[in-house]
Structure formats: C-alpha cells, structure tokens
Amino acid sequence: MNIRHLHLEPEISFKTSRSGGSGGQNVNKVSTKVELNFDIAASQILTEEQKRILLEKLGSRLTKEGILQIVSQAERTQLGNKKAALEKFYSLLAKCFIKPKKRKPTKPSKSSKEKRLFTKKRNSEIKKMRRNPPQ
C-alpha cells in the first residue's frame, strides 16, 4: 500500500525551535529544528482500520494523548529538516502497513535426513571408541 497517496499533510502540524549541533553563530538565532506532530485518532483521512493498525504498531512512539512526534535536526535549514521529518513520517507509516508473509511449513528433504542420521551414527562410533579402547 502506498501511503503517500493519502495526502496527510493537512493533518500534520509542525513546530520549530533552535537546534544544537553544527552551524556556527547561526545556530543560536535561527529555528531550524522541526518537530512533526500527527494525531492519529483525530485523522479524517485514515480509515478506522488504518488508525487501529497505527495505534497498535506505533504505541511506544506516541505521546499520552496519542500523537505521533517525529523530530528532525540533522539539516542546517528549516526546510531541509521539514523534508527529512516528512520522509521519516511516511517511511514509518509505510512500514506499519506492510503485511508479513505467511510462513509455509516445510519438511526436511530426504538427503538432509540421511545426512543427519549419518552424522549421528559417526558421532556415536567416535564416542564408542572413546569408551571401550581396543586392547
């Protein structure tokens, strides 16, 4: 499922603040750190099933109010951090909607059974030789 086609931008809010790290004197006066906030429960675009999946899978990343927060401060510009936060957001949502493949139970092959039995027999012979040394 491609999550990008949902266009969740209208429901996303951004908050900016001054970030630490490199940037010289500029870092002390420009708000480049971006915090993306998305209220899953209040979303009008997501279906109830999608909300349930997100709340279940992102439980540890949500605030007490059920808001997903993503912080980006790696870039030196506010726009760069905004783009990075959106990328993180969409990749996180995409991961949540990936359905794991169902495991098909398989049986061991005939050759693998024979190899296992042969190895067991050989180990048994080796141990037998240790117990009863020839006289």
Image (cartoon, rainbow, N blue to C red):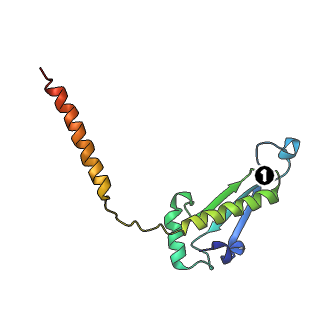
Give x and y (percent) for residue 116: 28, 48
- In the picture shown, does residue 65 fall above or below 117? below
Residue sitting nearer the eye, 115 or 64 = 115
Q: Quadrant of residue 37?
A: bottom right
- In the picture shown, does residue 5 fall above or below 13? below
- In the picture shown, does residue 38 fall above or below 48? above
Query: In the image as oriented, which residue stretches furthest toward the right?
Result: 25
Give x and y (percent) for residue 109: 32, 59
Q: Where, quadrant-wise, is the N terminus in this rendering?
A: bottom right
Residue 129 as seen in the image, left or right of residue 84: left
Query: In the image as oriented, which residue stretches furthest toward the front?
Result: 135
Residue 108 as seen in the image, left or right of residue 121: right
Residue drawn at x 59%, y 77% is 46
| Residue that carries the numbered disc 1 in the rendered image | 75
Q: In which quarter of the image is residue 9?
A: bottom right
Residue 76 as seen in the image, left or right of residue 103: right
Residue sitting nearer the eye, 84 or 31 = 84
